[in-house]
Image: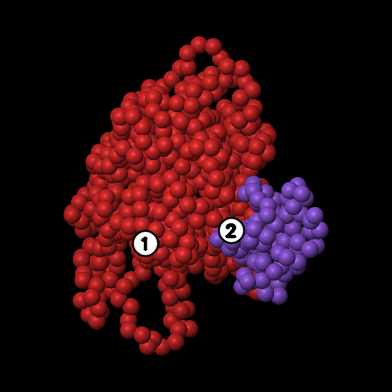
Amino acid sequence: MQATGSSHDLALRKADFSTLCEALDYAAQGATGVNFYNARGEIYASATYAELRDEAMVLARRLMGIGIERGGRVALVAETSPHFVRFFWACQYAGLVPVPLPATIQIGGHAAYVAQLAQLIRNCGAAAAMATPEWVDFLQEAVADMDLACVGTPETFDALPEAAGDVPGVTPDSTAYIQYTSGSTRFPRGVVIDHKTVLANIRDMAGAGLKLREGDRFSSWLPFYHDMGLVAFIIMPMATQRSVDFLGTHDFAMRPRKWLEMMSANRATITSAPPFAYELAVMRVRAQDAEGLDLSALRVACVGAEMISPEPLERFAEVLAPAGFRRSAFLPCYGMAECSLGISFLGLDEEVRIDYIDSEDMQHDGIARPLDPVEAEGTGHRVARYVDCGALLPTFDIEIRDDNGQPLPERHAGVIHLRGPSVMSGYFQDPEMTREALSADGWLNTGDIGYLAGGRLFLTGRKKDMIIIHGRNIWPQDLEHLAKSQPGVSYNDVAAFSVPSADGRHEEAVIVVQCRDRDEIKRARLVKTIIGMVRSEFGIDCRVELVPARTLPRTSSGKLARARARLDHIARRQAAAAVHAQPATDAPETVDEAPIRYIA
Amino acid sequence: MSTETPETIIETLYGFLERFPKAAGNLGPDTKLADDLSLDSVNLMELLVEIEDHYDIGLPLNMMGDITTIRDLAAKIAQLVEDRA
């Protein structure tokens, strides 16, 4: 099987369409398309946009025959497969709204996964649901007590009769998709993105952000249920008539080298991943392997989605330099599903840049006062470092606001507020959450904290409590819910949050539990049970700290003060470490390993 | 052809698992991979790659939801080896 080519005669149009259907109609006039690679790195499916459009049109007529009202939701278990892409575009032509659902399961996590699917399907009120044969049993189990018009595999849908007449199509204001922003099983938030909204964001990203050009080729292993996987690698390549190569997420996780091989073989020019993926890839690549790879065509390697330090990127660049990888290809970016995807990008061919600032000034006054890290050494000033996430994409307005909602000047950290045509219309059927995030005049409260300096955005923290591990968003309420389900743990006894790991390079989840039991065996069992539950539901390791009753701080209205609980926990850990520590003989640390993060 | 049984597979798995810190002296057929051995997702991927390469099988992600113990994993591998033969 032959992959679709990177170049064709069709003139490059950077998403200047009014709907995604119009964009696919145009892409179908060219020769580019989508390509899928298996665990052995072999291509197993390929379709030009012309073929994809024809197939989507047939499927759209079959979907119409089910009798779902216009704007009805179709849940798609988003395994990396050609079926997902076909169904996604078929929904658009049929005037239906695709809702990607996670296709990942933890060890021993059968029940938790089924519960998650059921919750999301209920939340979006799906009228139909599709999963490939590998996942359909979980889907059937999830919808067992629901009444959907059609549930099954692609084969089930392909056996439906085609409806007669024209496909209804869409308008710029139609909903293009609903994106669930976290794996939260109990507090799902479905970001609603319209056709005009996602196209506005892609124009920004393809234009000012990536400066797409003839011959560009995308390459990704990111999950299709992740905003970056969906928008940057399914929708953007189509809306800019570029070819894209996909590797399954699980296949990447097992053999990260396959990602590099796929990019090498097809001379990919654009990829994107969270920082841990670059770290994982370089762990599995030996120096001699690099010589067999050719990454010289790769001009953009976006980095986003979680907190990182620059060191793993340095290592990746070093190990893959013999393969022609250039470190200037790294492109830190900031984004979120609520803004379709992209918000700010570092300039092309700029090297990753770090702002060194006075850590005390930042902590006390939120002021980012620049320091020379070399000069600061020996003066007792602690240095914090933040990564330059680049300039805002052109259509965004930004305000950095203080706690009273007042705009702050340059180099003052505050909550990032954004406005522009890429911002969501709201959370699906959740007016309360929508009001909290979006003001009447269109400003989105991102919940992220940062500052501006010379027109560049620097992220310093998060106001909202979301925990991000390996690029996945995890809501503390979900972790707290698991702990509260244990006997003897009451509603008020739990706080979950994340802290930087001991080496400062990752975040780790912490659950503090107030425990009245003095029996050491029971206490140890409680800790082990909670850790096990979190692992089977979320696939992450967490730390559980048992504390006496009335340790957790509350607000005056009796609500859990999670941010203070976190600071208290860090203080307890530091105190414990000080007691156990050997007398320090090394020079005092000058670089504070405080969060350095890129987000997307 | 193959003479693999769940019992021989369990023995092989012990060999693969030994290098994980919590596995030392802690391995039995009913050992829970996640809860007892604290395998995180990176460890788990390494283990799966070793198993795939050793038995020349593909381990689909969707089976992981029903595997808790070493015995569960061995039974699944035995079935996949048989299907392949």
**Whether residue A80 can be seen here:** no
Residue B31 vs A261, above or below: the answer is below
At label 2, which amino acid type do we have?
Met
Q: Does residue B11 appear in the picture of this structure?
A: yes
Marks 1 and 2, how far apart at CA: 26 Å
Residue type, numbered disc 1: Ala
Task: Have a look at marks 1 and 2 and say if they share a chain.
Answer: no
Where does label 1 land, which residue? A321
Label 2's element? Answer: helix
Give the drawing colour for chain A: red
| Residue B69, numbered label | none
Q: On the image, which quarter does residue A74 sit in? A: top right
Q: Which residue does the image show at 27% across and 42% down from the upper left?
A: A211
Chain coloured purple in the rendered structure = B
Residue to which mark 2 is pinned: B45
User: Secondary structure under badge 1?
Assistant: helix
